[in-house]
Image (tube, rainbow, N blue to C red):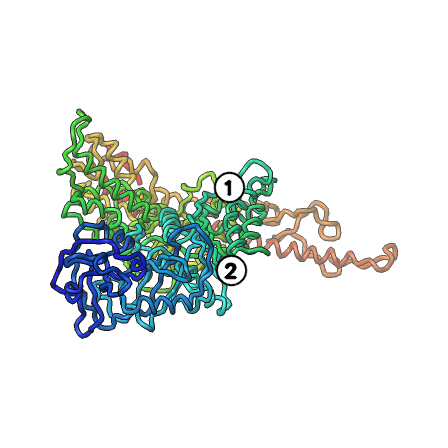
Amino acid sequence: MADSSVMKMTVKTMPASDLAFTNLAYCSPSDLHSFAVPGSTDLFLAIVGEVFVLSFSYPFSLTYDFDRFNISDGSIALNSIQRRHARVSAGDNVYVTRFIPPENFDLTVLTVDLEFVRKGTKNEQIDATLLSTQLKKKFINQVLTVSQKVTFEYHGTNYILTVNRAVIEADENQTNGIERGMIGNDTYFVFEASNASGIKIVNQRESATSKIFKEKEFNLLSLGIGGLGAEFIAIFRRAFTSRLLPRDVVNRLGTKHVKGMLLFGPPGTGKTLMARQIGKMLNGKEPKIVNGPEVLSKYVGETEKNVRDLFADAENDQRTLGDASELHVIIFDEIDAICKSRGSTRDGTGVHDGIVNQLLTKIDGVEALNNVLLIGMTNRKDMLDEALLRPGRLEVHIEISLPDEVGRLQILQIHTKKMKDNSFLSPDVNLQELAARTKNYSGAELEGVVKSGTSYALNRQLSLEDLTKAVDEENIKITMDDFLQALLEVKPAFGSASKDLDLCRPTGFVDCGDRQKLIYERVMFLVKQVKVNKRSPLTCLLHGPNGSGKTALAATIAIDSDFPYVKIVSAEAMNGLHESKKCAHITKVFEDAYKSPLSIVILDDIERLLGYTAIGPRFSDEILQTLLTCLKKSPRGSKLLVLGTTSEVTFLKSVGLCKAFAAMYPVPLLSSEDANKVLKQLNVFSENDIEEVSKALDGIPIKQLYLLMEMAAQRDGRSEEPVYTRKEKLDITHFWIVFRNLHLKSSSSSIFPFTITFLVLFTGNSLAGELRPSDHGLQYQFSSPPTESHSPPGKMKSFFGDSHSSPPPSHSQLLPKATAADGGDDDSWWRDGAGYRRDHVMRHVFLAASIICGVSGVALLVVFTLIYFFRYRKHNHSNSPTGNDSKEIRF
C-alpha cells in the first residue's frame, strides 16, 4: 500500500555500470530514510512514477569515488531499463511515494520470460534450479510487478527477465488488483523462453502452468462472443487443459493432447467466430484459416499436396524443437465440402477420398503430429466421414446451438456496445425485452436486427431530395421502435412459419361450438404437457370430413402455444419432388425442430403426404416409414408436439400410422346450433336471417359455409369490400340461390336413399330374371340343359307343380343302374343325381332372394319418399325466402 507522502525527484543515471544489475534505485542518505518501511531497519521501498515498486539504497562501497558519484538530495538514480519502463529520461522529474507492503505479500509463484540483453548472439542452456537459487539470493525482499523488466548477470552473460505472472498469498484486494509481490526464500520461479531467443531451459520441474494463452483470463464479451459460455468451458476442458500443464506432468500422466475438435450446429450461431477467437487467444503461431473448397485443385494430386502444405510448418517445428514446439492451429471452415464420407461421391476422381486419407495420415498416422490443433466447422455433421470423428482425430464434438435468452442478451449487448458508449442508443431501448422477443434467433440474425434498426435511425437523418446535406450526428438516436420494426424484417430461420399459419386460416378462427372447443382445450392441455414433460415427442391426430376445419384448428393451436419453432409439412410444399426428396424434407423439418427447445410440427393432410389414392389403393411406403420413424424418435433436450390432420382415418388405421399418435380427436361438421354461433360471430346476416339460415345448415363443413357466404356476397354485388368487414348485411335471397346451386348435403342426402332403393330393386329384378313362367309355374333356367336321365325331353323342372304335372320321378328312376355295356362299374348315375339335387336347392335360394329384394325395395321406396316429403318439403316451405324467386328454391 502507498503512503500519503509524495516526493518529486529528479532522475539521474546510475553512478556505476555494475549497479544497473542490482534492480535498485539509488538516492541520497537523507532521502533514503523517507522510504523506510516501518518495523525494518534495512528495507526501503517506494512506488516510482506509479508504475512499479523499487527498493532504494545508497552506494556505500569504498570502491566508488564519493565526490564523483555523489547523489544530491531530491535526486533518484535509475538504470536504462527502469527509465524506459517508467517512461522518463535523465533530468526529468518523477513522483516517488513510499510503499508499505501488506501482510502475506511474499510471492509464491513468479513466472518470468528470459532473453539476452544482446539478442541473437548465442545459444545458452540454463539450469532452472541453479538460476532460481541465484535470483533469490540477488533479489531477496525486492518487489516485482507484472510486465516489469529486470537486468541481471548470470555466468558472465547479461539477461533481461520480464515478469509475466506474480502469485501471492494475500488477497488481490489488498494490492488494488495489481499483480505484484515480494521475493522470498519460498518463492518458486517458473522460467519461460521463446524458441527464437536461443535460450533452452532445463531441469524445470513442477511448473504452475504452460504459457499457451496470451491472457491470464478471458472475457468472452470483450472477444465478441456471447451466449457461448458453456460451450467455451467444454472446449477449454477437453482441448486445452492438458496443454496448460507442464510437459513433465503430461508425460508422467501418460496422456495425449487433443488434436482436433468439430464445431457443428445451425448456420449463424457463431462457429466461425468461436474458432477465430480461439486462434487469436492462443500464444502460438498465427492460425491458418482455410475454407474447405480452397484446397481443391483441378490437377491430379495437387489437392492432397495442398493439405500436406498446411501441416509443413508444424512438421518442421516438431522435427527441430520436439516437445518444445509451439502450437499450430489449422481452422477448416465448411469442412463438409471436402471431407465427405468416403465412397459417397460418384465423380470418378476420388479427390474427396484422397483428402480424407491425407488428413487422417497427418493427424493420426505413423508420424502423427503432436503440436497441431485442427478445428473443423460444419452445418452438416452427418455428411462427414466417420473415421474423422473418432478419438484421436476430430474427437471433441461441440454443438453450437441457438442461444437462449441470456445468450441473446449478451449478443445484443456486444453489438450495441459502441452505440451506447457514443450516446447513439436511445434510453428507451430495452435489450432485455428484445432478447425475450427474439426466440430462436441466431447470433447472425441478431446482428441483422441491430443493423436493420440502425438503418431506420440513419434514414431519418437523410434527405432523398438532397443527399449531400450534412448529417447531424447529435440527433442520431436508435430507438426501441427501430428495433421493433427490424424484427418485422429479419425473421429467424428456425422460427415460426407465420405466413404458412396465416394461409391455413385466411379468415381467422371463430368459435364453432362446444364440441370443437372441447377438442381445442384438450390439445392445448397437450401443449402445456409438452412444456413440462421430459418425454418427447407428444403426438395428436385430428381427423374428420373434408372442410371441417382440422388444419385451421391445428394452426390456431400452434399460434396460441407461442412456441418459437412451428413448421407445417404439407403436400403443397413438396409438389413435384421425388419420394426420396420428400423423405429428406420431412426429416430435415424434424431435425430442425430438435434444435429448438420448444417446437410444433404440423403434418397436414397425411394421406396426401403419403400419396394415397383410393383406386388401387396406392401409397408411398418410403414416406410412411419416414413418418413412423420421426413420430417415434425421442430427441434429447428438445420438447416437440406433432399435430396431424387427415380425412382418411380408416386408411391410416390400415397402414398402422394411427398407432404412432398418442391422442386422436374427431373434428365434427357444424350442427345447426354451431352454424348459428358462427353466423352470429361473422355478423353477415340480420338476426332473423341467421335463425332461418342456420336451420338449413345442419351437417355442413365450415369451409363450405365460408364459400357460400363469399359466393352470395359476390352475387349480391352491392359492395366490393369483403363480406366479413362491410357494413351492408347479406341478402338472404342470394344465399338461398347459391345454396341450391351448390347441391349441398341436403340435396345429395335426398338422392342417396333413392339410389339405394334403386340398387335393391335392380338386384331383385336381376335374380328374378332367371325365373321364367311355364305351365307348371315359375321355372329356373338351368345354366346347362338337363340330361335325358333327369327330365323328359322338352320339359323343365318345376318349383311349384300343378294338377297337370306328372308325379316326380322315383329314386330308382333318378339313379339308373349300370348296364353291361357300361362295363358294370359306371358311376355316372351318382354324379347326375348329385347335380340334380344341387340345382333343386339353388332354385329355392334364388327364388327367396328375389322375393326379399323386391319387398325390401318397395318398402325402402315408400319410407324414403315419406321422409323426403315430410322433412325436406316442409322445411322448404317454412324456410323459403319471400319474393319472386321463392318458388325456385329446392333442397
Residue type for callout 1: Val
Label 1's element? helix
Left or right, residue 86 beside residue 840:
left
In the picture provided, is 738 more to the left or to the right than 113?
Answer: left
Picture coordinates of residue 259, whole percent (x, y): 48, 57
In this rendered view, identify the residue nearer to me: 825 or 138: 138
Residue 4 visible in rendering: yes
Residue 295 numbered tag: 1
In the rendered structure, which amino acid carries the disc numbered 2? Answer: Pro
Q: From mark 2 to mark 1, how far is it between C-alphas? A: 25 Å
In the shown orientation, is residue 478 left or right of residue 359?
A: left
Q: Are discs 2 and 1 less than 8 Å apart at CB?
A: no
Query: According to the image, label 2 marks what residue?
Result: 391
- Closer to the camera in the image, 545 or 154: 154
The quarter of the rendered structure image containing the C terminus is: top left
In front: 682, or 789?
682
